[in-house]
């Protein structure tokens, strides 16, 4: 088979040695209903593992995020903790600015010092504006400087429709985010800081003798839900970023602009129920799996193993994996030196006529140049091959 030939195969038919059988399995008819109607200005349902969007409406619309802003405040705190720049036992000072913050509060007192670990719970569980400002000032020196840091992190994460002016979500001009961006941020929190993610599942927290409950009603209604954050202002309406895990699949839902606390929980539950019922997370390949072996010229070896740099995870309708097809194309006449990790082809995954994903096919090993006489022989062989 020519190196330029397109190879077709199904995911389910790999042998133990990585061979591929050119046989297409016939799957049963897959029935997926239309997504439920969601009463919200904007919403999105994302598979946390693959990052694929299952359902969306106005997902990139820029809207006031209210206290969903605090997800970024918490994200930066968790990164600083992970890097060792701060610790949960650090005593953060409470400024007059933090103490005077209105809205939802942790009830910290000006002139005192509060453990960073408690402030993080105050941000996530109690949605404390005072705790958020205190954390911002402790990490960056001022809330303005912290907002600049928030925007840098948003840009790094690929949040294209987000701009922060403060650490709390307090209404102000030029402070906005989108349902899609907030799902991206929630996914980063879940994936990057698993040791801190348990904070988002805490139902109540007591500080200064005052016990406050987490406003995420789904923590009480659905045992699969373990996060993340609520938000509300008059301009934003009632918002919720939720995440749930069931049977090895984790979903993230974002609803923005609902009309009540109960509505944001109800509409989020609709999205999560739909996703778990009709979709699954399917791991097609692992990083380093040998997906193809290509011929190499001018090298110390004449074969090159090709694969992926990362696991390939897909979100597909339940029980439809036998309908997946993979198409591999490899660059013609590969010549040494071959560099491990460099792309020498492409993997395209389809379901029917729809392309689901395209990934670079990379060298899984180096191939050094051969000696003079071996290279000369290969040059002669390629010359005669070109004639035919």
Image (spheres, grey):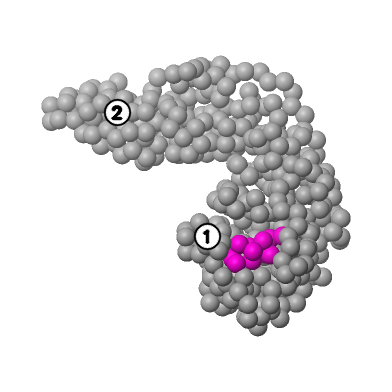
Tally the marks: 2
> Is 293 left or right of 179, judged from the image as shown?
left
Q: Quadrant of residue 52?
A: top right
Task: Residue 124: say if magenta.
Answer: yes
Labelled disc at residue 8: none
Q: Is residue 161 above or below residue 13?
A: below
Q: Secondary structure at mark 2?
A: strand
Marks 2 and 1, Cα distance to the nearest angstrom? 47 Å
Q: Nearer the viewer, residue 8 or 156?
A: 156
Query: Measured from the top left, where is residue 204 in percent x and y?
Result: 76, 57
Q: Residue at x 22, y 23 (%)?
A: 381
* Structural crowding at the residue carrying mark 2, measured as other residues with C-alpha within 10 Å and reported as few (<14), some (14–19) or many (≥20): many
Labelled disc at residue 81: 1
Is most of the magenta stretch helix, strand or loop? Answer: helix
Q: Residue at x 53, y 70 (%)?
A: 139
Q: Nearer the viewer, residue 112 or 226?
A: 112
Determine contact: label 2, label 1, CB under 8 Å: no
Q: Residue at x 78, y 63 (%)?
A: 211
Task: Residue 358: say if magenta.
Answer: no
Labelled disc at residue 296: 2
> Is 205 left or right of 261, judged from the image as shown?
left
Q: Residue at x 74, y 27 (%)?
A: 30
Q: Nearer the viewer, residue 137 or 377?
A: 137
Which contiguous range is marked in magenta?
115-125
Q: Quadrant of residue 380?
A: top left
Q: Nearer the viewer, residue 120 or 209?
A: 209
Q: Along the polypeptide, which appears first: circle 2 or circle 1? A: 1
Query: Measured from the top left, where is residue 142 in percent x and y?
Result: 56, 78
Query: Measured from the top left, where is residue 243 in percent x and y?
Result: 70, 48
């Amino acid at each position: 088979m020519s190196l330029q030939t397109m190879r077709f195969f199904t995911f389910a038919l790999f042998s133990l040695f990585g061979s591929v059988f050119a046989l297409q399995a016939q799957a049963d008819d897959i029935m997926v209903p239309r997504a439920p109607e969601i009463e919200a200005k904007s919403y999105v349902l994302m598979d946390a593992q693959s990052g694929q969007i299952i359902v969306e409406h106005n997902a990139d619309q820029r809207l006031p995020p209210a206290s969903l802003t605090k997800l970024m405040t918490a994200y930066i705190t968790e990164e600083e903790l992970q890097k060792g720049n701060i610790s949960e036992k650090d005593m953060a000072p409470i400024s007059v600015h933090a103490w005077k913050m209105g809205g939802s509060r942790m009830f910290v007192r000006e002139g005192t010092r509060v453990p960073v670990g408690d402030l993080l719970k105050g941000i996530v569980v109690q949605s404390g504006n005072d705790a958020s400002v205190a954390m911002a000032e402790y990490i960056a020196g001022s809330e303005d400087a912290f907002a600049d840091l928030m925007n840098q992190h948003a840009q790094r994460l690929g949040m294209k429709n987000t701009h922060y002016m403060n650490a709390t979500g307090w209404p102000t001009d030029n402070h906005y985010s989108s349902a899609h961006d907030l799902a991206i941020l929630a996914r980063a929190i879940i994936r990057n800081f698993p040791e801190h993610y348990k904070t988002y599942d805490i139902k109540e927290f007591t500080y200064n003798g005052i016990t406050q409950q987490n406003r995420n009603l789904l923590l009480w209604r659905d045992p699969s839900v373990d996060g993340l954050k609520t938000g509300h202002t008059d301009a934003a309406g009632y918002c919720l970023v939720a995440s749930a895990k069931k049977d090895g699949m984790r979903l993230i839902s974002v609803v923005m602009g609902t009309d009540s606390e109960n509505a944001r929980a109800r509409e989020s539950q609709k999205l999560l129920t739909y996703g778990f019922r009709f979709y699954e997370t399917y791991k097609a390949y692992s990083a380093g799996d040998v997906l193809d072996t290509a011929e190499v010229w001018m090298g110390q070896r004449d074969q090159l193993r090709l694969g992926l740099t990362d696991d390939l995870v897909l979100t597909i309708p339940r029980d439809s994996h036998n309908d997946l097809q993979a198409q591999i194309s490899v660059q013609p006449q590969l010549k040494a030196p071959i560099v491990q990790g460099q792309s020498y082809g492409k993997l395209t995954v389809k379901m029917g006529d729809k392309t689901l994903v395209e990934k670079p096919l990379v060298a899984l090993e180096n191939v050094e140049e051969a000696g003079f006489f071996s290279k000369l022989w290969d040059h002669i062989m390629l010359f005669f091959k070109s004639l035919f």
